[in-house]
Image (tube, rainbow, N blue to C red):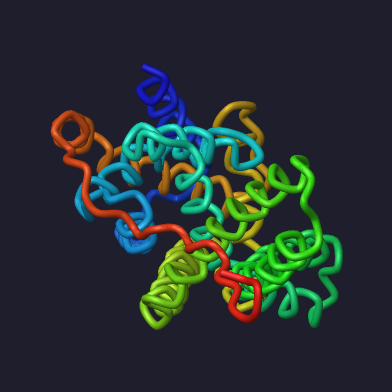
Amino acid sequence: MIFAVLLVHANRTLAAGGWEATGRLLVACIAAAVLYIIAHLMRAFRLAVIAMPLLGASFRTVVLLHLFVAPWSLILPLKTDELIRLGELARTAKSWSRPIIVLLIDRSMDGVVLIGMALLLLAEGGWNVAAPVAVLGTCLSLLVLAFFLLPVLLEQVQRHIFVNHYQDRALHVLALVSKARGMLDISRRTISAAPAFLILATLGIWSMELVAIAAILMAIDPGMLSLHGVVEVTLGRADASWRIMLLGEQPSPAITLATFVFFDALLLVWLWVPLPYGKRQAGEPQRVRLPAAAGIVLTGPGKV
């Protein structure tokens, strides 16, 4: 029902938007919609490659899960659509800890691309837009480093506690450290299992979205058709889409048109998803999952 209301609102706004209804604009919108669907399919494939070993879910189920949740990404503010995706992943995995790891890995893949976009905007003087994007990209990139560095550090913490502390409290701390290290370790192994695919998929995702925005700019505002202009509209659309959909804001013709075209595209795909996704969820078997890291092994005199 919510999607239907928003679809009517989107297309009314498109009809009254003042854009010249030319064949060129129609072709640009169709091309942008197709490219955006491809970008989301690539996001779904990336999520599946990350989630399969961690959750024991099938490739098809995770792809359908992503497409089932995708329209909310244009509606809910501050990326709160991730809570819906987390809930669906938790329903599939029948737990919460591993789905959280899946989402952290998935989002961390975008860090370097966001830093690159921020540097491009900064070179053109767009500090107001570049600063928050740079901070977000840096945080996501540091998260990837944490997946590789923290397990080693936590192993040393485990060894220190095991050798030097004997109180009951130490056992509780040791258990918590062990669980944290296990989660970080399986994150590292998941990334290490398919680094080339994750990198290429991430580059493909952002390339498709940038080209989709470029197609729209070419039709309605050729003067902005530059790499800087495309990046600026792409980031602006990501930030403003929920305000456009829910509050009726129109920050710029390109951002507004892109938001509605992308929403229509995702809804077109979504119409085919609920039935097969529901069947997959109902009959999803529990497959083998990537095991957590083993406990510490201490060797030497007096140690086992």
> For residue 291, which quarter of the picture?
bottom left
Residue 168's place in the image compared with 192, above or below, is above
- Identify the residue at image location x=71%, y=71%: 156
Q: Nearer the viewer, residue 283 or 184?
A: 184
x, y percent for residue 130: 78, 67
x, y percent for residue 66: 35, 46
Q: Quadrant of the C terminus?
A: bottom right
In this figure, what is the number of numbered marks? 0
Would you say residue 224 is visible in this rendering? no
- Identify the residue at image location x=44%, y=26%: 6
- Asked if residue 44 lies left or right of residue 275, the reply is right
Q: Nearer the viewer, residue 45 or 5?
A: 45
x, y percent for residue 270: 28, 38
Which residue sits furthest top? 1
> For residue 26, which quarter of the picture?
bottom left
Q: Nearer the viewer, residue 256 or 197?
A: 197
- Asked if residue 57 lies left or right of residue 94, the reply is left
x, y percent for residue 2: 42, 20
Q: Quadrant of the N terminus?
A: top left
Would you say residue 48 is visible in this rendering? yes
